[in-house]
Each structure stands twice: as structure tokens, then as C-alpha cells.
Image (spheres, coloured by chain):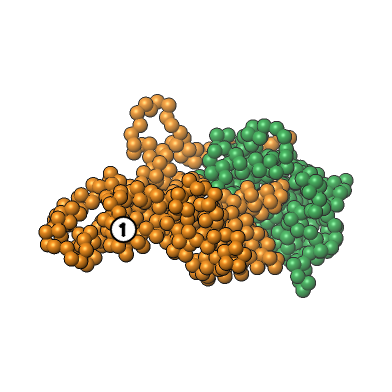
Amino acid sequence: MRWGSGFTASGLAAGMRKHHELVWPASSKTVTLPQLTRRLPILAYTLRRLVILIASLLIAAIVLFVLLRLLPGDPANALLGVGATEAQIAAARSQVGSDQPLYTQFVSFIGNLARFDLGTSFVSRASVAGEIGNRMSVTLPLTFLGFLLALALAIPLGIIAAVRSDRWYGGLISVVSQLGIAIPVFWVGILLVTLFAINLRLLPSGGFPLRGWTNFGEAAVAMILPVLTIALVMAASVLRYVRAATLDVLGSDYLRTARALGSSFPQALIRHGLRNGAVPVISILGIELASTFLGAVVIERVFSLPGLGSMLLLAIQQRDYPNVQGVLFVSTLLVLLIGFAADLLQRFIDPRLRDRGAGTP
Amino acid sequence: MSLLSVQDVTFSYNASKRVLDGVSLTIEPGDSIGLVGESGSGKTTLLRLLLGLTRPSSGSITFNGTPLDPRSARFMRDYRRQVQVVFQDPYSSLDPRQAVLSIVSEPLRALRIPGDHRQMVSDALASVGLERNILGRYPHEFSGGQRQRIAIARAIVAGPSLLLADEAVSALDLSTRIRIVDLLKSLSEQMTLVFVSHDLGVVAALCQKIVILEKGRIVEAGATASILANPQHPYTQRLLSSVPRMPA
């Protein structure tokens, strides 16, 4: 078939010029960073976002430093018993650095953080970074496996709830997800323990092997109920967003057009729905993942898991300031990194946001 | 044999009100037909029926003598290869997160049309007056007129014999509208065109035949020139008198 070709592109000249500006000029050999960031908006955005990440981390460190110094009593007292002599207290203050002026303490604190030297625990005398690493081997799998399982549940169920919103099971999924949002996470944990550990005796009610993941089978079994608890609660919330995003896509002109052009409904939904629906959901996922990581302390308490949350609670009880400081700093870092990754992923998926890279973050 | 035949079609979203009532019309190969009516006259519903997106409550639609069967995937694949569509809004009918290559090649993939898709897309873009080097760009980088050209390229890339256009220029500014009408006029010389619009002026410039719809019924149909020169039905007369004119 032939088509008419008598149309000049003169009206498009301005638009084309804009396009050509984006093409790497063959003659240019050296490119400055500002030139590069103008040409690659996503790079500009990443750099800006990275600066904000570092600034946020610095602010968090300052807040952390100030808050811990606002606590009543001297950290050195935590090292000693109630019957310590003045000389012992002075020696302890010298050891933890609380006898130094505040600005000296602050410079030392920031310098140590920059080297990721989180100090040593007052109580165990072990490296805080090492202890956090050990505890992370429980908290990170708990959070990320819970997150992945939540996604595996929420995405298909959210899509079904939207696509079949006129059927009884579409409505049922919505109602159950509402209930899931209303129930507190510890309550879901207790219900699962009651069902699977106490009544059915299929799974342990809590605890984690002393040898950790080297005893893989036992560790994996110990993780099942905590992971399931996180997944169910998170899935209920994420499902609502997936459903709303899918409903938006279902009402879109481009989906209707795709069907009219020959795509089947599943084809059109996969091709247009997943990517378009993903953009609003990703920002929610970042928040959900961060809050789950921070909220893991509750799950670890319910299931007696030796994770980061339990470490923080114990450190607070023992007034082990280096541990408190270390856990809070690492948690803040992870939350900021999750937000950073979510923002970048959104830009990667959405070309309109990508081209707006030089704009507000 | 007619290309597309609509026989006594009725359609209603609920029992109380008919959106289309006893509509019959025949589209011959090479025709350019304008379906004209005010909002709510049923023209977009008729277009949806012609696209097979909705089934009529009663009556029949045949394509090349074969009844339109939206439930048959095989029939609909062949049908869509022959019948493609351009929708009204060039801003929302293009997926904002897909590049031009992916957008325009969608019918080729969906209809499993073999061949060099990249080349076919480039050819379709060239035929609507767009550069071939825009394949990697996204809809937000284009003006409304350019987007509508992309939508038209997508509609013709599979080589249809019938092009349906639903208010395809009403979302565009006047100068862009004129250029897109010129483009559609050129395309109508090579394929059958059904142009749905509330704008009599555009239809007069584009279509040889005209069908006037009022409240789901065809009130007048025939050659555009003769109907515009001598409208018989009061509704057509009202439509004509409502076309804005420049003061003398």
C-alpha cells in the first residue's frame, strides 16, 4: 500500500531542532560536567539527589548527636556501677570522650561516621559496626523477604481487584485488604503464632538459631512466620495502591486505543498497565519498605529475633550509647537509600520525569 | 459488495434509553463519510460498534459480507488489520511511557504482522510528514499536531483498508487542525475513511458523503455538497445555521 507523501516537515522544524540539541555533537571532544548534565537530565537529577542524600545524612547525624547529648546523665555513668569513685568516673569520661568540649566531640563523631567507625559498645566492648552487621543478617532478610512476598501477593491481587471490581471476588479482595490495613502488625503476628505454632504445631513460635544462617534450615524455618506477618500487613496496604493505579490505567485512553488497534485485553494491560501503574506505586513501595524496616523492631520482639530492632531496644535499656547511635545512624542511612533508589527507579520508568531531571527533585 | 454494512442496529446502555435506534448505513470501498451530530447523538457509540469494542443490542454489522463477531479472536485480528482508528485526544491516546517506535508498531505486534517493523514504522511516519529519526522519542516531546500525526501513523502502519477517525481534529488548534485535515484528505484518496465529528465545516472539507445523526437516528444522508446546499431535515438545517461565520 502507498501513502501520500506530500507533507513537508516545515512545521516540525522547531521540534526537530530541540531533538538535535540532545544529540552528542561529533565535533566536541571535551565535555564539562554542566554540559553533560544538560544533555543527560537523569544524570543531573542523580547528582542533585545524591547531594540531597548526603546533606540529609549530615542533618540526621547532627540531630542524632544533639539528641543523645540532651539525654540526662553522662554516658560514662553507663560504663560504671552506682558505687564508682570520682577517679573511676573521670577515667570513664576520658575513655568515652565526654570530658571534651562539645564541638570537639562533634568533629570526632562526624569524622568517625565518615570512616564508618561506629565505635565500640559500652557493654560488650565489641565493635558496633560488627554487631550491626550480625544483626542485619536477621533484619535485612526479614524485611526484604517480607517485602518481596508482599509484592508477590499485592500486585496480582490488586490487579484482579481492579479488573474484576464488578465481580464478588474483586469486592472481597478489597474488603479483606481494608481489614488487613486496620489490624496492627503485632496482632497479625500473634494470630499466626496461635494458628501455626500453638494449634497446628507446624512452625516455631519464635527464636533464631545461635549459629545464625550457618544453620540454614533452622534459620529459614524460624523466618517463615515473621516474614509472613510482614508480608500480609504490607500486602494489604500495597494492594490498595496497586488497585487504584490499575483502575486509573483501565480508564485511560491509551489502553482503550490499544484494544481498538488490535491488542487483546491481557496484552494491553501488560504492555501499558504495568509500567504506567508502576510509577505511583513505586513511591509508595519506597515508603512501605522504609517503614517496614523501621517497624521490624515490633516483629523481632513478637518472634524473639536477634535483629537490629532488638539490638536498639537492648541498647536503650542498657544506656549503651554507641550502639543506640550506630543503629539509629545505619537505619537512617538505609531509609534514605531506599528513598533514593525509589526516586531513581521512578525516573527510570517514566520518561517525562526523566526529562525533567534538572527540575526539582 | 459493500465494505462495511450496518443494518437496523440499535444499542442501549440500559433498558430505558436507546443510544442508537434503527441505524442502517453502507460504506463502499473508497468512500469518505462524515458522521455528524451533536454530543449525545450516538456517533461515538456507532464508532465503537464499528470497531467491535461493543456489540449492538440488535441488528447486524457485516464487513465484506461477513458478520462482525467481537467474540472471535481470529476474526477480530483479521478485521483490525483492515480497520484501524484514530481517536480524538492526541495527548491521552498515546501511552506516555512508550517511545514512538513502540507506539506506532503496536498494531504490527498485536496483529502479528510479519516484516521489518522498524522500517514499516519509519515509512508510516514519513507518510504523515514526520521525520524518521524520532523513533526513540516520547509523546511529551511533541506538540498536539505532531502527536496526532503519530496517532495517524499508528493507524495506517498495518495498511488498513478502512480508517475510522473519532473527532480526530477537535482537540487541535485551528492551524494544526487544517494541516491534519489535509493529511486525512490525502489518506482518504488511498483508503476508505469514516470521520466522526460534530464540526460540519471539517466534514465538508474532508468527506464526499455525510450522515447526520440526531438522538441515535439517522435523519439525513447523502452527498456532502448536496446536503449542505439543500438540507432537508430541520435538524440538519439547525446544525448548518449554528456553524460560526466570520462577519461580512
Q: Is residue A309 visible?
A: yes
Residue bearing mark 1: A324
Residue A242 vs B13, above or below: the answer is above
Residue B231: x percent and y percent? Answer: 76, 61
Q: Which residue, as the protein is rendered here, is positioned at the far left?
A: A87
Instruction: Please state the total of marks drawn on the protein image.
Output: 1
Q: Which residue, as the protein is rendered here, is positioned at the far front?
A: A83
Residue A342: x percent and y percent? Answer: 46, 51
Residue B22: x percent and y percent? Answer: 83, 64
Q: Secondary structure at mark 1?
A: helix
The chain coloured orange is A
Q: Is residue B175 visible?
A: no
At x 66%, y 35%, the residue is B117
| For residue B224, side relative to residue A111 (left or right) | right
Amino acid type for the residue under numbered disc 1: Val
Camera-nearest residue between B5 and A140: A140
Quadrant location, the N terminus of chain A: top right
At x 42%, y 39%, the residue is A40
| For residue B82, side relative to residue B87 (left or right) | right
Residue A18 vs A84, above or below: the answer is above
Q: Residues within 10 Å of mark 1 (few under 14, many from 20)?
A: many
Chain B colour in the picture: green
Camera-nearest residue between B177 and A302: A302
Chain under label 1?
A
Residue A330: x percent and y percent? Answer: 35, 52
